[in-house]
Image (cartoon, rainbow, N blue to C red):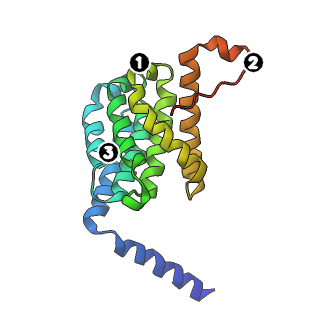
């Protein structure tokens, strides 16, 4: 038993050694920004500019862990914004798309893709039908294709679940675009964008 505990401690310290102090500070900063924004509660929409810009900047960090953290924080903050989310929708989608579309063999990070799928699902659910007016089909098509690939073949279960939630949200948008009377007729309609 004692040897197993020591091995776990060695793994934890080894993981810590892999993350530089600067990266650790940026990770802590993204979490702090997220927590501060969430603590603002009802007054967050009036002060959302600074935290959103900081987190969006973090999504372009050279360290994948920082990108993933900022994407996850954006999903949490976006979920609390209500109508104040609308001006940020396109920019949030672009940030998520950059990590979602990248192929793993070309440097995509699995955690960042997972967080991007989560952000997209959260954003689409929060926007609802307003997404039809705010987001362009040209932006959604490649995202939809990539989400389907991740839903069907991502190596980890959580990424598949987030991708499935985002695909479901996009399918619901497609149904809404065609009219709610088609859904009420008892047929299930799934829009598959080429």
Q: Quadrant of residue 165?
A: top right
Which is more N-terminal, label 2 or label 1? 1
Kindly identify the residue that appears in the image at 34 percent across and 41 percent down. 95
Q: Residue furthest bottom?
A: 3
Residue at the right extreme, as displayed: 186
Q: Which residue is mark 2?
A: 186
Q: Counting other residues with Cα less than 10 Å from the Cα at mark 2, is it few (<14), some (14-19), or many (20 or more)?
A: few
Residue 9 at x, y percent in the picture: 48, 79
Distance between the alpha carbons at the discs numbered 3 and 2: 45 Å
Residue under label 1: 133
Contact, CB < 8 Å: mark 1 with mark 3?
no
- Residue underneath mark 3: 33
Query: Neighbour class for label 1 at 10 Å: few (<14), some, many (≥20)?
Result: few
Q: Residue at x 53, y 30 (%)?
A: 170
SS label for mark 1: helix
In the rendered image, residue 188, in percent from the top left (x then y), is placed at: 70, 24
Q: Is residue 174 above or below residue 50?
A: above
């Amino acid at each position: 038993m004692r040897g197993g505990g020591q091995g776990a401690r060695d793994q934890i310290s080894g993981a810590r050694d892999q993350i530089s102090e600067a990266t650790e500070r940026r990770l802590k900063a993204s979490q702090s920004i997220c927590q501060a924004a969430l603590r603002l509660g009802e007054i967050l929409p009036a002060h959302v500019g600074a935290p959103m810009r900081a987190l969006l900047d973090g999504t372009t960090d050279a360290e994948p862990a920082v990108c993933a953290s900022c994407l996850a924080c954006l999903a949490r903050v976006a979920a609390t914004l209500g109508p104040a989310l609308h001006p940020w929708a396109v920019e949030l989608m672009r940030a998520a798309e950059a990590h979602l579309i990248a192929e793993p063999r070309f440097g995509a990070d699995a955690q960042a893709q997972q967080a991007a799928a989560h952000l997209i699902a959260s954003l689409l659910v929060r926007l609802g039908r307003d997404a039809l007016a705010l987001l362009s089909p040209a932006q959604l098509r490649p995202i939809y294709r990539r989400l389907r690939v991740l839903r069907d073949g991502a190596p980890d279960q959580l990424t598949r679940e987030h991708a499935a939630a985002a695909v479901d949200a996009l399918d619901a948008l497609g149904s809404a675009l065609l009219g709610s009377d088609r859904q009420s007729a008892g047929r299930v309609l799934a829009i598959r964008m080429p």
